Image (cartoon, rainbow, N blue to C red):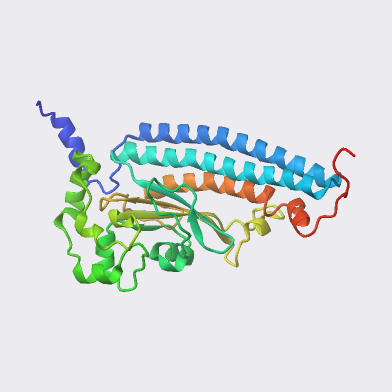
């Protein structure tokens, strides 16, 4: 096989470059444009569909139709809101996977976790074979730190963090056993890990069975060694939001409300861009790109809240609707 020096040089640059981005600026801009165009279509369709369903429900209550009739319209509204949300966010999830597939050559696992009314989190689009149960923020360092600091959480070497961070929490890992038994592997070091990622399809390398044995029963988290968490949030926008939106978003005293999280992990260490983030001068490409996707998701969540749980018509109906006792049409 002929060896191309240019290809070798590009591969070496990709491995040693801390951004680990293996795509040109032109390719990245094309990914961005395509994703935004698709978002425009999805959001327009979703907003139109849910607003029409809400209008029909509102007209039914305004005309004082029997409660059972209004309930049918409300059920249609909720089903429309939920199914449309899942379909739309699934499109965004595919674009996130596409971004990493193009820039890394290996797909990560992507989860979209939404905050529930019980203040737990649930993955609304779990991967195949993923044990999807409600999680508590306090069981995971990643979620807890995002809440506390209001910025993303990035860990490019989870096994190393487990061994060195005495306060680390992750419900999917048996922390005590891992601290006592796991040994750091040379293949998890940055240069080696990125060479493996650049030169091979990671899925063909097999899972790390030594790391897998520290998984808690019934989880798949054992296979992953890098992860990043991006909050789906409206940050410090309280003074710019129109009247009523602050209450819909339930902004806290810091003018921040976390509606959910974009959670991405990969079974290779050092998978993500490691450059600094946390302020408006963020130089971390992955964080910047993922915030764009998170902001897209936030608009779908806000639209759903506006027309369902936070709708004045819905709230009034649920608090005690008194419509006509006659059957519709009589």
Q: Residue at x 40, y 62 (%)?
A: 142
Residue 116 falls left or right of residue 146: right
Q: Nearer the viewer, residue 72 or 295?
A: 72
Q: Is residue 180 above or below residue 111?
A: below
What residue is at 53 percent from the left and 39 percent from the top?
87
Q: Identify whether 225 is placed above or below 176.
A: above
Give the total of numbered labels: 0
Image-quadrant location for residue 42: top right
**Quadrant placement of the C terminus:** top right
Q: Residue furthest bottom?
A: 166
Residue 49 lies in quadrant: top right
Relative side of 197 to 91, left or right: left
Residue 91, position in %: x, y?
48, 38
Residue at x 68%, y 42% (from the top left corner): 76
Nearer to the camera, 50 or 186: 50
Left or right: where does residue 125 sit relative to residue 208?
A: right
Along the line of sight, which residue is nearer the eye, 213 or 302? 213
Query: Measured along the vertical axis of the image, is residue 58 above or below residue 279?
Result: above
Q: Residue furthest right?
A: 330
Where residue 252 appears, as percent x and y from the top left, is 60, 65
Q: Is residue 189 visible?
A: no
- Provide residue 164's location: percent of width, then percent of height: 26, 69
At x 40%, y 54%, the residue is 131
């Amino acid at each position: 096989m002929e060896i191309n020096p240019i290809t070798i040089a590009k591969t070496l640059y990709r491995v040693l470059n801390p951004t680990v981005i293996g795509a040109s600026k032109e390719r990245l801009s094309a990914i961005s444009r395509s994703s935004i165009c698709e978002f425009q279509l999805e959001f327009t369709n979703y907003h139109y569909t849910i607003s029409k369903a809400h209008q029909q429900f509102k007209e039914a209550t305004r005309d004082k139709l029997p409660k059972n009739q209004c309930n049918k319209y409300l059920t249609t509204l909720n089903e429309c809101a939920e199914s449309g949300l899942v379909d739309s966010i699934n499109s965004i999830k595919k674009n996130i996977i596409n971004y990493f597939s193009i820039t890394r050559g290996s797909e990560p696992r992507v989860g979209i976790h939404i905050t529930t009314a019980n203040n737990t989190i649930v993955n609304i689009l779990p991967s195949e074979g993923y044990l999807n149960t409600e999680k508590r923020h306090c069981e995971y360092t990643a979620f807890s730190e995002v809440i506390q600091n209001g910025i993303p959480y990035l860990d490019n070497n989870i096994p190393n963090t487990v061994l060195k961070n005495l306060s680390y929490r992750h419900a999917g890992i048996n922390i005590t056993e891992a601290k006592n038994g796991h040994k750091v592997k040379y293949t998890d070091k940055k240069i080696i890990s990125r060479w493996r990622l650049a030169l091979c399809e990671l899925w063909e390398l097999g899972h790390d069975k030594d790391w897998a044995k520290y998984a808690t029963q019934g989880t798949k988290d054992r296979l992953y060694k890098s992860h990043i968490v991006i909050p789906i949030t409206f940050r410090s926008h309280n003074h710019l939001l129109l009247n009523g939106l602050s209450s819909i978003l339930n902004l806290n005293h810091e003018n921040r409300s976390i509606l959910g999280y974009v959670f991405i992990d990969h079974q290779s260490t050092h998978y993500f861009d490691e450059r600094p983030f946390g302020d408006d001068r963020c130089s971390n490409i992955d964080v910047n790109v993922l915030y764009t996707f998170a902001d897209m998701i936030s608009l779908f969540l806000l639209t759903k809240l506006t027309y369902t749980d936070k709708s004045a018509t819905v709230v009034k109906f649920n608090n005690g609707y008194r419509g006509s006792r006659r059957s519709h049409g009589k």
